[in-house]
Image: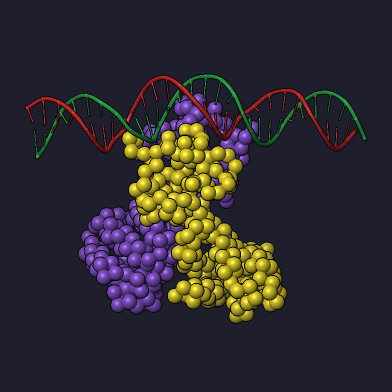
Chain colours: A yellow, B purple, C red, D green
Amino acid sequence: MDNQGPSTGRGLHARLLASLGPAITAGDYPPGTVLRTDELERRFDVSRTVVREAVRVLESMHLVRSRRRVGVTVLPPEEWDVFDSQVIRWRLAGPDRPRQLRSLTALRSAIEPAAAALAAGQATAAQCAELTEHALNMVATSRGQQLPAYLVHDVAFHRTILRASGNEMFARLGDVVAEVLAGRTEHRVMFSDPDPEAVTLHVRVAEAVRARDAERAERYTREITWGALRELDILAP
Amino acid sequence: MDNQGPSTGRGLHARLLASLGPAITAGDYPPGTVLRTDELERRFDVSRTVVREAVRVLESMHLVRSRRRVGVTVLPPEEWDVFDSQVIRWRLAGPDRPRQLRSLTALRSAIEPAAAALAAGQATAAQCAELTEHALNMVATSRGQQLPAYLVHDVAFHRTILRASGNEMFARLGDVVAEVLAGRTEHRVMFSDPDPEAVTLHVRVAEAVRARDAERAERYTREITWGALRELDILAP
DNA sequence: CGCACGATTTAAGTATGACTTTTAAATCAC
DNA sequence: GTGATTTAAAAGTCATACTTAAATCGTGCG
């Protein structure tokens, strides 16, 4: 009945988390649902120790709230720490995936142009070289159904931009962008090569950063992310 | 010796967290430092249960990693979940505050214009009214050393924009923006009223959103956040 | 001499029972 | 019916015993 996954992480608490987290973010337990610890103990056949640790983590993500004499209450989505990497992963794996992908794409579209502008002023020589290399690899793999290879370079390119921005928070979004790009590739028709214009834009961004031209780096990046937004509108207007 | 704060949260685990979290994010324990649970038990005079729960939460934030036969290892800052609201608060309260404020301001500057553009297309009539009200209140409190009152309306204005964007992740940044704005007010000379131009810009944004003019809403918001970035450059170029 | 493999030992992980504290809810007094 | 008081339910805490993984060390073999 419960316990859908055959346990993801290692350690009982991690397994419990991997079971409860996705379930809650998927909406299996409507906000207000009360879970009692001893009930969870029985349901998952683990000790209090394990249940309590898992609940603590869920509580730190604001997915639940634990109160004496009441129990562990599931909180409404507005309370959730939607920036928590774990929460993002759980939601991407659940029925909320489309909505989550939209939010993340909007986030990307806001952040990446700014990151590119900063990168133009901050990137090291090594990072500039890296960018150019990734862009050229994207060009090389952009034709002839080499989508998986293309994706690798695409992710690496955007990761480098975000890291080169010098902003720790932007840098942290590398994983998120990787997820979004992977999700896009996944849903793309397998034989459609990436848009040549988008590929060119990446080369342009690399050039602009190397030339320390923040304005152009930002503009071309914005065009890239506009493309991503447009795709979403096409997929589900 | 330790246990600086007289305990912030309620519950022993929360107190331990409130002690360890700030210490780690402040860099009191350099990356690689190993904390043994039994040592923590003695240092804070709490039971195993409590220590373990606190450590679990720290682990979920990627501040530490717990391994058998090794102990609880403090991770390098690159690993930290810098988007975790708790981590943000801890760092804002510690020596990393200036750097954190910079990162957050850059984040704001990227997000808010995008949010305003979305809000122009999404805001409900009630939200439009709310925006106008907050903007007018800002005008009213912008002169005569009413900074605390001004701050309240300023925060409310930006919160409304973020919520009205319809993007759950943008909405979640309300608290962060509030922190940044509060931090700015705090450091401002007490008798300097806010920049009249900035005040006007808020009114313009409210108008643009009401008029469903995404382009103008975005542009005026960008000018507001540019101002915030400029202030940072002046404070520490 | 070095490497591999197994015993050792350390520290985290798990289980359990007893007890405390908070607090919602029911009961009682007025 | 309102307010004070009691009750009980569930989380919180503690202490202890036991299990498990993995570094370390030692021995023996190549």
Q: Position of residue A60 (x, y in %)?
A: 44, 45
Q: Where is residue A216 in the image (x, y as percent from the top left)?
A: 55, 76
Q: Can residue A29 be seen in this view?
A: yes
Task: Identify the residue shown where x is 60% and y is 34%.
Answer: B71
Q: Can residue B63 be seen in this view?
A: no
Q: Which of A189 and B232 is in front in this view?
A: A189
Q: In this view, does B21 lie to the left or right of B202?
A: right
Task: Identify the residue shown where x is 30% and y is 77%.
Answer: B211
Q: Which of B145 and A11 is in front in this view?
A: A11
Q: In this view, does D29 lie to the left or right of A206?
A: right
* Residue B115, image quadrant: bottom left
Residue A102 higher or lower than D16, as above or below: below
Task: Identify the residue shown where x is 50% and y is 25%.
Answer: B42
Q: Where is residue D5 in the image (x, y as percent from the top left)?
A: 18, 25
Q: In this view, does A23 lie to the left or right of A171?
A: left
Q: In this view, does A206 lie to the left or right of B218?
A: right
Residue A235 higher or lower than B30, as above or below: below
Q: Which of A134 and A16 is in front in this view?
A: A16
* Residue B199, image quadrant: bottom left
